[in-house]
Amino acid sequence: MTTEAKVGAFVLGCFSVLAFTVIYLINAQLGGHTVPYRTYLRYAGGLEPGASVLFGGINMGKVTAVRPAASDPTKIEILLDVKENTPLNEKSVAKLGLVSVMSGAALSITTGSNDAKRLLPGSAIPSQEAASLDEITSKMAVVADNANGLITEARGELQGISGNARTLLANLNTVTGKPNQKKIRVLLDSVNGMLATERPKIDRLSDQLNALTQHADETVQNVNGIVSDVREPVLKDLAELQRTLLETKQLLADMQVLVRANDYKIDDTIENLRTATENLDELTESVKQRPWSLVRVKQPEDRKVPK
């Protein structure tokens, strides 16, 4: 056997061992520790057995079969094996996906919720339909039809706007024509002449207004000065009046205290005055009846009536 044949046999042997090892590892990883599940879709989108099963974007298994469902032929039954202990739950949703732009179709499963109940092996995973190419094409056709109608409508509106713009330009040309330019020039000349004629009057009126404003400023300043001059004496008088009122209030309070303290004495004095007044009244009456009592100490005897 030649050396080239020996080297070729060695390389083939090494390649066989490597392939066997890789196949064994893959089968050990996906075959010995996988759990079967199933899901149903109405559109498989080219999904084939051997396609990847992504759980939250992580490759966790393979599709084992894609076939019409026996119970409902309108649905596609998809059988899959995923790694054991993959946390599939009732909130997980299976739908078509892609591993990358250049790769084929894959089955993508969302992570669901941590609080949801875990799915038992062999259970059906809830699914969500993806839009097919036919649906996308029909929607694009509808959008194109709507766009054509919108373009036609916009074209009509643009034509109307163009017509209005032409009318506006024609009106502007009419307004800015030579006859109107002459009229505007005459009007401007008249205004300039009126301004030239009335300018002296306007200047005099401005001077008078300035003088009146200055006089008003002087008057305001004089009033401010008078108010400032009068304000201090008035403030002093008010302060003096306030002080006098406070003293009067204090004096009234003292008198009230004094009257309350001598209340019983005032009553005695009033009673004595009343008694003196009564005595004086009696004396006056006695003097009226017997005026001689002021001269004689002893009262004369009454005359006897002659018999």
Image (tube, rainbow, N blue to C red):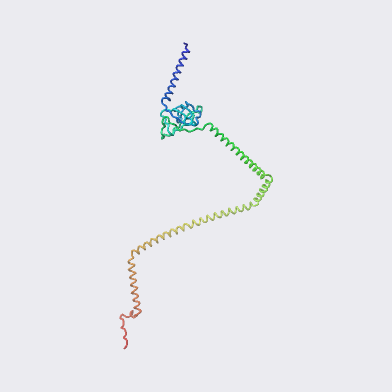
In this view, the residue in front, 152 or 278, is 152
Q: Residue 242 in the image: state x and y as whole percent.
A: 42, 59
Q: In which quarter of the image is the C terminus?
A: bottom left
Q: In this view, does 245 lie above or below 69?
A: below
Above or below, 129 relative to 17: below
The picture places residue 238, in percent across and down from the top left corner, at: 44, 59
Up-down relation of residue 126 to residue 231 (above or below): above
- Left or right of 268? Residue 244 is right
Quarter holding residue 249: bottom left
Furthest-top residue in view? Answer: 1
Quarter of the image where one finds residue 255: bottom left
Q: Which of 298 and 253 is in front in this view?
A: 253
Percent position of residue 19, x then y: 45, 20
The percent position of residue 276, horizontal first and vertical second, equals 33, 73
Q: How many labels does the image show?
A: 0
Please tell me which residue lies in front, 213 or 222.
213
Q: Residue furthest bottom?
A: 307
